[in-house]
Every structure is written in structure tokens, then in C-alpha cells.
Image: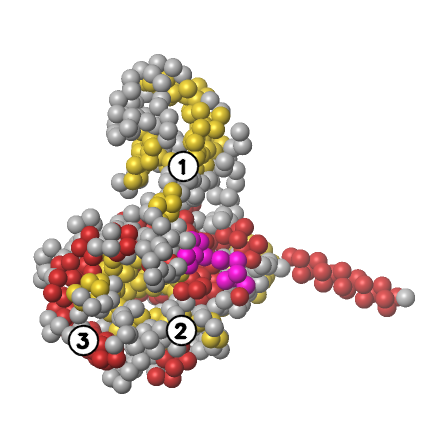
Amino acid sequence: MKRILLFAAAMFAATLTWADVNPKPFVIPELTSWEGAEGQFAPSGRILVKNKQLMSVAQAFAADYQTMFGRELTVVAKGNPLPGDFVLELSEKTPNPELGDEGYRLGVADVARIEANTLKGVYWATRTILQISEQSASHVLPCGNTVDVPVYPLRGFMMDCGRKNIPLQYLDKLVKVMSYYKMNTLQVHLSDNGFKQYFGGDWDKTYSAFRIESELFPGLAAKDGYYTKRDFVRFQQDAEAQYVDIIPEIDVPAHSLAFSHYRPSLGSQEYGMDHLDLKNPEVVPFLDSLFTEYCGGPDPVFRGKRVHIGTDEYSNRDPEVVELFRGLTDHLIKHVESMGKQAVTWGALTHANGKTPVKSENVIMDIWYNGYADPVKMKEDGYLLICIPDGYVYIVPAAGYYYDYLACDWLYDNWTPSQIGNVKFEEGDSAILGGMFAVWNDHCGNGITVKDIHHRVMPAMQTLSTLCWSAGVKTTPWVEFDHKRQFLSEAPGVDELARTLGKGTRTTAEYPQLALGPNTTLDWVGDEIGYDYTVTFDLKASEINNGDVLFEGPNSKVYLASPEGGKLAFEREGYLNEFDYVVPKDRNVRITIQGTNKETVLLINGKFRQALYPLTIGSATTNAGAAGASSDPYSAAKMYYQRTLVFPLQRTGNFKGEIRRLTVSNFIEQK
């Protein structure tokens, strides 16, 4: 009996000790290891740098810490560590093979000590510290140790900037988000075009864009928006400082309508003007000059080590043309290599199967569809693979095919970059560099805004971050992950989701005594509020003039009277959407506008008035009922036009009248 009691007491003591040991902290991506200890670390306000090369990392860490928490950290380069110090150091003369290029060791006790082989590894450790710190009011860290090393060296995202003008200001914020979640590669798809069925079947009228300034080919850059060379260089430099590699992509010889619009002789009459005519002797010199303009010289516009040459979805109908396609692919690979770049291509060489050899050594291939490029065969041929399978990780906003939002719950439990379509490789296979997901803006002019795109990107970014860094090492169940991820910041100083009233909690801000006239700054509210929200206010308009604005912000306006129809309306990114409601003059009316990622709803005096949900435009096929009519989504002319609104709250506009009893909620109030 005495022995049983002693055993029970020992078990009880062990339970108490275990309860005092800190569990693995929640961060994205999940730490690949954790050994908990007892206690917490409270920062002293100092960062001690053990190697002078780390000063830039320490300063970036201090700046982000102050942005997020309002506390200044002092960077010092001499002396011994004091309790509460962050200590940054590179491994001794011999790099630690366990840590590799991006891994780090973080030990938290009386000091928080980071060790890594590279500046990048130390920088990633500071992202971990920031994420843990933001989850407590006092910004303390749990004591413990981690050796955190990514499974895959490339963890990325591709943004289609060809079919939709994505401002560089947004790409800057996107880089910050990626860096915060240790996603290290952004592929910028710089050229593309719409589908001609949405433009009356006329290639001349079909939307196309090339998004970067060209001095060699004046007029080639898109008139509705492009990046100057200087700005694009600055963008890449800023990304480099945050350890995000930019892969610029010029997609040829398909998806090339921008080039045939510029020079019609380059286009194919046989396969469509979005295909360059590979039999035309002008094509290769044109492309050589184009890539040289951005890759050549001692200070190239494309600064990074990698450049994407496209080679996606060219017709394989004619065996002769297949050989020409393979020859062009090989030529462009060697052309960009001659300028010191590593070539990246879309996987197409199973689709374009032929005899003409295509260089594979040190060439990276985006594997997006196994029918276009068999990943097993591509590995055998010697290509380095990026897993970006369309059936798992393609977002095409509001298109009705692929994903509007990724199935993150399924991906979290079932996918890593080792799964390319229906082919499963060993985890960490050296042929697989890593994984990416993509946003394709196929439907030009469908009302989708950059805000809408970002709303789709964030859950995917957080999910793919974990799957590409930690792969199968996941101890947090999906439901818990999905809940906790919403309480993390997008990045230091970034709030593209416009979570004005906080993250993850239902909050209402009421201003019952406030009277707002025209042209009043609302800096006590926030510039805008994102999905889901409810904004309610009393309005008495003394005049009703077309074009009068009630609220405006950095990305949108709410009109008292539309410039076109005189109705209550809103505009963002050039899209104007009217409610079927005219505000009465000299009469008090209580207006409620509710916004989700799918619709914008109007209530008047507490009663439902109208919901602006997606409009279906066009038909299911380009020529319904005709011989050969197809249900293929790429041949469809159906579009789902979106009428969403991130509500502007930066200031009131030029209306005549008064707004009272403004109420803002970050949820949909039930009426």
C-alpha cells in the first residue's frame, strides 16, 4: 500500500512539473521543434548584436517591434548580455549544418538568444519573436528552445499582374506579409491577356497588358497601369531586405496578345493572336531584345537570380510547331542564362513532347498540371520542380472554376509540396524546391478589387506557409489553427484586411453625439473597414447633386448621389455600383450598409432595401447550341460581376447636409 501511495505521489509531482513547462507557442509557420521550459522572458529593451553583419537585421527587428508594440528597442554591439536582452549572433566560423541556409536556433531563458548560419536565418527568427510577442498584452515570450528549419527551400506565391493592374504599393505590402510568414518567393506575372469571348470574339478588342516600362519598345507598356523600371528596381531592393526573392515573369510564346497588339506581325493567325507565330523569323530577335532589356548589363532591371520565361499552354496540334516551341524554350533558357540568370519555366514538355532537346540542368520548372508536364519524367530529365498544382492551389477570383478561396482546411490536413497532382514524392525530395500558390485574374473587368484579392490571399498565405516550411510537422489541429491565425497581424504596419476595430473579436464603435459635416477627417475611426462590417448613420441632406460624396477613403467612395444616375452608390477601382434608392432632400433617413466578401446590402430606416450580389453576365458557352459548343470554363463567356465594398471611413465628402449617430461594427448586425 505504501509503495502505491509513493508511486501516486511521484506521478502527481510529475504532472505538476509538466504543467509548468511551456507548450509549443503558436506561430505561422509552425515551429519544427520545441523543448519547453518554465517561466517567461520579459524584454529589457535591448538588442545585443554579436556580429556587425547583423546590424541591418537588428535595426529591421527594432523598427518592426516599435511599429507593432510602440516600444523602442536599443541596438548595441558591445558588452555582455543582460537579463531581458535579445541576442543575435551568427554561427561560429564553421556553419552549423543542422541549420542550413534558413534555419535558426532560438533559446529563451534570461535572454532570448538567436543563432543562425545566415542573416536570413536570424531574420526569420525575429519574425517568430514578433508573432509570439503580439499574442500577449505584455509581449513576453515563453521560455524554451527551438531549432526551426524549413523542409523546403522555396515557399512562394504567384500574382497575375497581367490581366489585372496590381499597384506596386500593394505588392510592397504583399512582400511584407510574405516575409512575416517566412514565404520567400514572389513570382510577378508581368504580361497576359483576357479571353476573347468576353470581347466579342475579337482579338483586337481583347484586353492585354505588359506591366513594365520599355524604352526599347515605346508604347508596349499597358496604358492602364505599368511599373517604371526605377520603381520596379526599388521594389526588388525592398523585397531583398526582407529576404523575399522576386521572380519576374514575361510569359511567351502563348498568353502574348500584348506583343501582337504592339506588333501584329508577331501574332499567329492559325492559333490565335495570343500565340506568337513561331514560324515568323521576327519572333526570336524580338524576344531576345525584350529579355535583354531587363536582364542585360551590369545593373539589370531584373535584379534577382531567377527570371521566368513563361512557355505555358502553347498549342501542340502541329508536330512541326511543337519542335519550334521546344527550340524556343531551349533558346530562351540559354539566353537568360547568358546574362547570369537562372531560368524558370512553366511545365509544358509532356504536352509539347518532341525530339528537340531542351536544357534541364539547373532549370526550374513550375509543375502546374501533370498532363502538361509529368513530374516524374521531369525529375528524371533533371529539372528542379516547384509544386504549384492547379487542382489544389489555383485561385481564380469569382470565376466559377478552380478556387475562389482555396480549400485551406483540406490542404492543411492532406497536402504538402511533395504532392504534385496525383503523384506523391518523398517528403523533402531534393528535386522539389518547394511549393507555391497562385492568383489568376482570368476575368478582366469582373469587379474584383485588390482588396478582394487580398481577402482570398491571406488564409491561403498562412496555410501554405505552414505546409511549405513545416510540411508534415503539424501539432495544431486545423480548427485551432484557423481560429488562432485570425488573431495574428498580416505584417508589421500592414492591415489590408482593414480590421479597423481589432482582430477576431466582435466590436462596435458608436458615436451617438457626433455631428459630421462635409470634408471632415475621421481619424478616430480608421481609413476603412473590411469584411464583414455594418456601418449605420443618420443623414439629412440639404441638397442632392449628382457626384456628391458622403464618405471617402484611400480605395473607395460612397456617393450621396451617383455621378451617373443620382442614386446612392459606391465606387472603387473605377467600378461604379448604384443602389436602387434616391436619398430624399431635407428629410432625416437612417442608412445602414453591410458588406461581406460576396455582397453589399442596403437597409433604410432598419428595413431591407437591396442586396448588390454578384451579377451573372454573358452565357455558358461562346456559341450556345452551335456545333462543337463546349462547357469548358475557358470557352465560356459567363462572368460573375462582383459588387463588394470595403467601406471608406477616412473622411466625409463634399455633400451638403449632416451625418449623425454613426455606428461602425466589424460584424453583420442582425436586423
Q: Is residue 90 above or below residue 326?
A: above
The residue range painted magenta reads: 401-413
Residue in view at x 53 percent, y 58 percent: 409
The image quarter containing residue 159 is bottom left
Marks 1 and 3: which is nearer the front? 1
Residue denoted by label 3:
335
At numbered mark 2, what does the secondary structure look like: helix, strand or loop? loop
The picture places residue 131, in percent across and down from the top left corner, at 46, 53
Q: CA distance from mark 1 to mark 2?
A: 39 Å
Judged left or right of residue 452, residue 135 is: right
Residue type at the position of mark 1:
Leu
Q: Is residue 292 above or below residue 610?
A: below
Q: Is residue 431 above or below residue 653?
A: below
Residue 431 vs residue 79, the one in the foreground:
431
Residue 392 vs residue 296, the one in the foreground:
392
Residue denoted by label 1:
612
Residue denoted by label 2:
370
User: Of the residues under marks 1 and 3, which one precedes in the sequence?
Assistant: 3
Q: Is residue 243 visible?
A: no
